[in-house]
Each structure stands twice: as structure tokens, then as C-alpha cells.
């Protein structure tokens, strides 16, 4: 994890710039600032803390519930900014958007989903994806096979193989989902709905 003693807080008047990035999709979520105290709190709690020039020290999501669980923190080459890879619990932007840059088509899964959509829109195209889209039994059989192979790799605690099998399962799940009339955006919307703070 991040060594705070190596950061150059002096260059920014006691602050470093922090870019929060979704650890699952790679999408940038927000830009903020942190001082040493904020980063110490972040390391101690496992959730992002920032230093606002107007609000002072703040725990992201303390009021809204839209916290950011830390996966990793890394300094840039100049040691005056930090990339925070996080798992967001709800929107990161104060206006309710997942990102302060709006809805971004970022991440490998979204690229993959777009490619599958192209194949689905061109039924005359050839290739493995098109073959799966055209054959219900074949795509459902592959979906079951990949899920079983991932389960076995996880049971064996074989991380490299589990990663490969998970990637295979994501691909086959997105193909099957597209054939059923759904999209990755639909799944993201459902996850956002589930993670939204519940009204009391």
C-alpha cells in the first residue's frame, strides 16, 4: 500500500491530487485532494477520506452513504498525486452520476459488450461470437461449462486459472445476456439500484 512518507505534499501546499477510479471497470470517478491526515484515515479505515479546501477533512459517503472502499493507492512518478482504485457504493458525483465526468463508456467489459452488440446487429457476420448468438443450445452449454470451470479453479485456489475462467465466463455471460435481450448497461443500472441508499 502507499508509503505516505514518499509523497510530496509541499508542492501542493500540503495537498496531493487524488483521482478515484472504479477498480472493476477502470472508469474515472472523481478528482479531489488529500492531505496526510486524510490519507492516514483512508489507510486506517479502508474507505476514502479527502481534504476539501472549503469543507476540511471529509469521509466520502459519510452523509450520503456513497462510500468508496479502497482496493489500492498508488503515487505517480512525481509523487504529488495519487490514483485510488476503489469499489464505489453508489454514485461518486454529488449530482448523482456514477462519475463526475458523466456516464463514461470505459472499461474492458463495456468494450466487449459493444463488440458483441456489433456482431448481434450483423447476423451475416462469421466468427465464434456470431455462432454463439445464432445457436441457443451452444451458448447456454458454454455458459454452464465456463461457470463450472471457474468454480473448480476457485475451489483449487488457483488464482491465475480462476482469473482466466472468470474472463471466459464474463464473455459468455454477455453473449447470452445480449441474446436474451439484455445489455451490460442494464446490469450496471441494476447494480446501481441495489447499491443506492434505502429510504428510511
Image (spheres, rainbow, N blue to C red):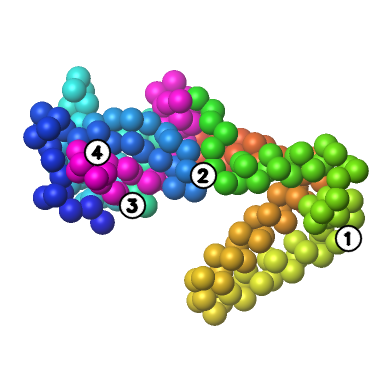
Q: Residues within 10 Å of mark 4 (few under 14, many from 20)?
A: many
Tell us which disc is closer to us: 1 or 4.
Answer: 4
The mark nearer the N terminus, 1 or 4, is 4
Contact check, label 3 and label 2, Cβ < 8 Å: no
SS at mark 1 in the image: helix
Q: Residues within 10 Å of mark 2 (few under 14, many from 20)?
A: some
Contact check, label 3 and label 1, Cβ < 8 Å: no
Q: Main secondary structure of the magenta part?
A: loop
Q: Residue at x 50, y 25 (%)?
A: 102
> Up-down: is 112 above or below 171?
above
Label placed on residue 137: 1
Real-space Cα distance between discs 2 and 1?
30 Å
Quarter location, residue 115: top right
> Up-down: is 3 above or below 159?
above
Label placed on residue 25: 2
The segment highlighted magenta reads: 72-101
Q: Residues within 10 Å of mark 3 (few under 14, many from 20)?
A: some
Contact check, label 4 and label 2, Cβ < 8 Å: no
> Up-down: is 21 above or below 96?
below
Q: Residue at x 13, y 40 (%)?
A: 8
Q: Whole-percent x and y of residue 155?
A: 56, 77
Q: Seen in the image, is 92 located left or right of residue 74?
A: right
Label placed on residue 81: 4
The mark nearer the N terminus, 2 or 1, is 2
The mark nearer the N terminus, 3 or 1, is 3
Real-space Cα distance between discs 1 and 4?
50 Å
The mark nearer the N terminus, 3 or 2, is 2
SS at mark 3 in the image: strand
Residue bearing the label numbered 3: 72
Q: Whole-percent x and y of residue 150?
A: 62, 69
Q: Seen in the image, is 143 located left or right of residue 200?
A: right
Q: Residue at x 29, y 30 (%)?
A: 32
Amino acid at each position: 500500500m502507499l508509503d505516505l512518507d514518499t509523497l510530496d505534499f509541499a508542492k501542493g501546499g500540503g495537498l496531493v491530487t487524488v483521482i478515484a477510479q472504479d477498480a472493476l471497470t477502470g472508469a474515472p470517478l472523481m478528482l479531489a485532494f488529500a492531505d496526510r491526515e486524510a490519507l492516514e484515515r483512508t489507510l486506517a479505515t479502508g474507505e476514502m477520506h479527502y481534504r476539501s479546501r472549503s469543507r476540511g477533512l471529509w469521509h466520502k459517503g459519510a452523509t450520503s452513504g456513497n462510500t468508496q472502499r479502497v482496493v489500492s493507492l498508488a503515487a505517480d512518478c512525481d509523487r504529488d498525486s495519487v490514483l485510488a482504485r476503489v469499489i464505489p457504493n453508489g454514485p461518486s458525483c454529488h449530482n448523482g452520476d456514477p462519475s463526475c465526468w458523466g456516464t463514461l463508456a470505459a472499461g474492458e467489459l463495456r468494450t466487449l459488450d459493444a463488440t458483441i452488440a456489433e456482431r448481434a446487429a450483423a447476423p451475416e457476420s462469421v466468427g465464434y461470437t456470431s455462432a454463439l448468438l445464432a445457436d441457443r443450445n451452444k451458448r447456454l452449454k458454454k455458459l454452464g461449462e465456463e461457470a463450472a470451470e471457474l468454480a473448480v479453479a476457485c475451489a483449487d485456489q488457483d488464482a491465475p486459472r480462476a482469473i482466466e475462467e472468470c474472463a471466459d465466463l464474463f464473455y459468455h455471460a454477455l453473449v447470452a445476456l445480449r441474446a436474451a435481450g439484455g445489455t451490460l448497461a442494464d446490469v450496471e443500472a441494476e447494480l446501481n439500484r441495489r447499491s443506492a441508499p434505502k429510504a428510511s
